[in-house]
Amino acid sequence: MCDILVVLQNAWFTDGQPKSHEEWLQGLWGSVTGQRLKSMLPDQADDVEVINASPRVGSAPTDSFPPDLEHIRAALTKYRPRVILGCGKLACNALRELRVEFITAPHPAWRQLRASNMAWVKETASFALRCRRARDAWAPERRGPA
């Protein structure tokens, strides 16, 4: 179970394929996109998982792959997130297709992203996380996917 599951669009890696999800995550958190994503996450989120809507990895930032609904569904089952954050049109469309509750957010690599956009996402995710934690505390038997 995680606090927040972030669904991005798809990964790209300049040096061929990353050896593991952890290697990709390390690169993400060290990038401008990762720094922007961090600023969109609530301070009280203890466990954040990040996946891409497609497991395929491109070799350039312009590479784009269609979402893989089974890949996303498997992550929802594995992580059982309290809050889901969909970043970008492809990720959000896939989450809508899966009919799960999620917060719509701009992709952190969006060139027109403003501090006000990131602050709104952070505030909304923080509120949603507090609500889910309260629900889990009062009715743990109802705990399920967001």
Image: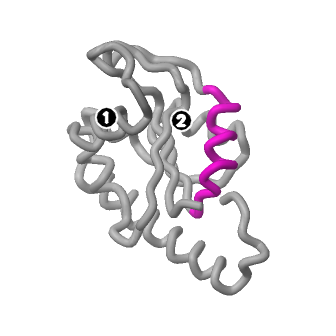
Which residue sits at x=59%, y=72%? 132
Q: N-terminal of the two: label 1 or label 2?
A: 2
Q: Amino acid at mark 2?
A: Ala
Horizontally, residue 16 falls left or right of residue 90, namely: left
Provide the secondary structure element on which disc 2 rests: helix
Between the C-alphas of marks 1 and 2, the distance is: 14 Å
* Disc marking residue 6: none
In the current view of this chain or complex, which residue is farthest to the front? Answer: 19
Residue drawn 65% across and 79% down?
135
Q: Which residues are magenta?
A: 68-82
- Residue drawn at x 52%, y 18% is 65
Local packing at callout 1 (Cα closer than 10 Å; few below 14, some 14-19, many 20+) is few
* Image disc number at residue 91: 2
Query: Which of 60/91 is in front?
Result: 60
Within-10-Å neighbours for mark 2: few <14, some 14–19, many 20+: many
Q: Work out whether residue 144 or residue 95 is closer to the camera in this orientation and state it.
A: 144
Drawn side of residue 124 relative to residue 137, left or right: left
Magenta-drawn stretch contains 70 = yes
Indicate the secondary structure of the residue bearing disc 1: loop
Residue marked by disc 1: 110
* Amino acid, disc 1: Trp
Which x, y percent locates residue 33? 27, 39
Q: x%, y% of residue 17?
A: 38, 17
Tell me which corner region of the image, top left, top right, bottom left or bottom right, holds residue 47: bottom left
Residue 6 belongs to magenta span: no
Choose between 58 and 22: the one closer to the eye.
22
